[in-house]
Amino acid sequence: MDIHEYQAKEVLSGFGVTVPDGALAYSPEQAAYRARELGGDKWVVKAQVHAGGRGKAGGVKVCASDTEIQEASEKMFGMKLVTHQTGPEGKGVYRVYVEAAVPIAREIYLGFVLDRTSQRVMIVASAEGGMEIEDISAEKPDSIVRATVEPAVGLREFQCRQIAFKLGIDASLVQQTVRTLQGCYRAFTELDATMVEINPLVITEDSRVVALDAKMTFDDNALFRHPQISELRDKSQEDPRESRAADRGLNYVGLDGNIGCIVNGAGLAMATMDTIKLAGGEPANFLDIGGGATPERVAKAFRLVMSDKNVQAVLVNIFAGINRCDWVAEGVVQALREVDVDVPVIVRLAGTNVEAGQKILAQSGLPIIRAATLSEAAERAVGAWKNDLSQGVKLRAIS
Ligand code: ADP
Ligand code: MG
C-alpha cells in the first residue's frame, strides 16, 4: 500500500526526520487559508497523488502570495495528473499540500528498499538528488552509494557517517544526516515498509538537513499489525478493481487483457495466465480465490471479474484439494444466476468431487463451456473471445 507525501512526512517526522512546515487542503480556498496560517512569504503547493514526477507534470508550484496559491490549486484540483509513474490515465488530485518553501543549497537522493539478494534492507543514496533513481542509475551510476543493514544490530552510526562522507556532506551536518538515516530505517522496519524514498533530501542554505519529498510503501500482508497505517489508505488513488477486491478479501491484480480468470491458488493462477498467453490470449486479471472457496466467494469473484468492462470471456480453473469441485460448481451456477454475466464462461474442474461438480454444471441448464484440461480451457477461452464460439454460447444477462 502506498501513502501520500504529506502522510509519509508526518510518519517520518515521528521518527526524528526533519520536514518543512506544511498543511493539507481539500479546496483552493482552504489552501490559501492554510498558507496564511503557516506564515512566511513563499510556499509550495503540491498535488497529493500516489506517484512521483509531479514537479515536471505541473503538480508542484512555488507561490509568493495567497492569491497565487489559490490559482495554482484551482488548476490542480480535479485534474488528472499524468506523470511518468501514473500511466496514461493519470491520477485524480483531491488534496493539495501547502508547504513552506525551503531555500535549497543541495539536493540528495535517498532510498530504503528491500534487497532480496542479500535479504536485507538496502540504503541507496546519490549526490545527484532531484533526478529519479532510474535516470541516476542510467546516467550517473558511479554516483550511487549502497549499504546493506545487518538486521541483528540495525543501522549503526558509523555506517550512516560513511554514507554521509561518500555523499560529500559537510562534517558539521553529519549528525543531522545520521539522525535522518536512522529515523528512516526505524520507520521502515518498525512499520513493515517495503520502500522509503526521500527525493530530494536537501541541505538548506541555513544548514539544515530536510526531507523535501517523501514516499512510503507498506507490506499489505503486515498492515493488520499497523492499524494507524491502514487508516492512511486512499482508495481514490488505487485501481478501483483492486480496492474492491481488497474489500472483499480477494487476491486480485488487474491487467490489460480480456480473458477474466477465477482460480484457486496463486501458483495455479500464474500458470493459468501463462497458458492463456500460450493460447494466444491476454489475461484480464490475476485472481486467487483461495483454498476453501464457498459458493458466495465464487459469486463475489464473478462480480469482481465482470466489473472489468474489457472482459470478453471468463475462465474458471479449479484444482480442488482443500476445496471441493461440487462447492465450486454450485458457486459458479449461483453466480451465473445472480450476476450479469454476458460473456462465455469456460470451466475446468479437477480434484476432489470432480464428477459431482461436472454434474451440477451439466444439470444447471446454463451455457457453461466445460473443459477437461487447462490447455483446452485456455484454447476455448481464447477461441470464445475471438468469436469462434461466441455465437451459439453467448450468455445473456440472467437475473
Ligand atoms: P516530485 O518528486 O513528485 O516531482 P517533489 O516533492 O520532489 O515532487 O518536488 C519537486 C521539486 O520541487 C523538488 O525537487 C524541489 O526542487 C522542489 N520543491 C518541492 N518542495 C519544495 C519546498 N518545500 N521548498 C522548495 N522547493 C521545493
Ligand atoms: Mg520527488
Image (cartoon, grey):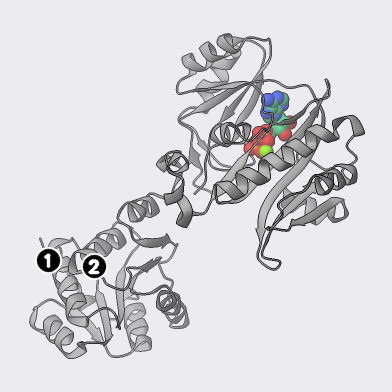
- Look at the image and tell me whether residue 55 can be seen: no
- Name the side, left or right, on which 394 lies relative to 100: left
Dividing the picture into quadrants, the one containing residue 263 is bottom left
Residue occupying the far front of the picture: 153
The answer to whether the residue bearing label 1 lies less than 8 angstroms from the nearest atom of ligand 1 is no
What amino acid is at disc 1?
Arg
| Image position, residue 158 (x, y; %) | 84, 47
What amino acid is at disc 2?
Val
Label 2, secondary structure: give it: helix
For disc 2, the neighbor class at 10 Å (few under 14, some 14 to 19, many from 20) is many
At 30% from the left edge and 71% from the top edge, which residue is drawn? Answer: 313
Q: Nearer the viewer, residue 391 or 1?
A: 1
Disc on res. 95: none
Q: Nearer the viewer, mark 1 or mark 2?
A: 2
For disc 1, the neighbor class at 10 Å (few under 14, some 14 to 19, many from 20) is some
Mark 1–mark 2 Cα distance, whole angstroms, equals: 12 Å
Dividing the picture into quadrants, the one containing residue 20 is top right
Q: Nearer the viewer, residue 192 or 56?
A: 192
Q: On screen, 282 above or below 132?
A: below
| Image position, residue 73 (x, y; %) | 53, 22
Q: Quadrant of the C terminus?
A: bottom left
Q: On screen, 353 above or below 327?
A: below
Q: On screen, 317 above or below 149?
A: below
Label 1, secondary structure: give it: helix
At 71% from the left edge and 42% from the top edge, which residue is drawn? Answer: 182
Q: Provide the residue designation for mark 1.
A: 337
| Image position, residue 67 (x, y; %) | 57, 10
Q: Provide the residue designation for mark 2.
A: 298
Q: Quadrant of ligand 2?
A: top right
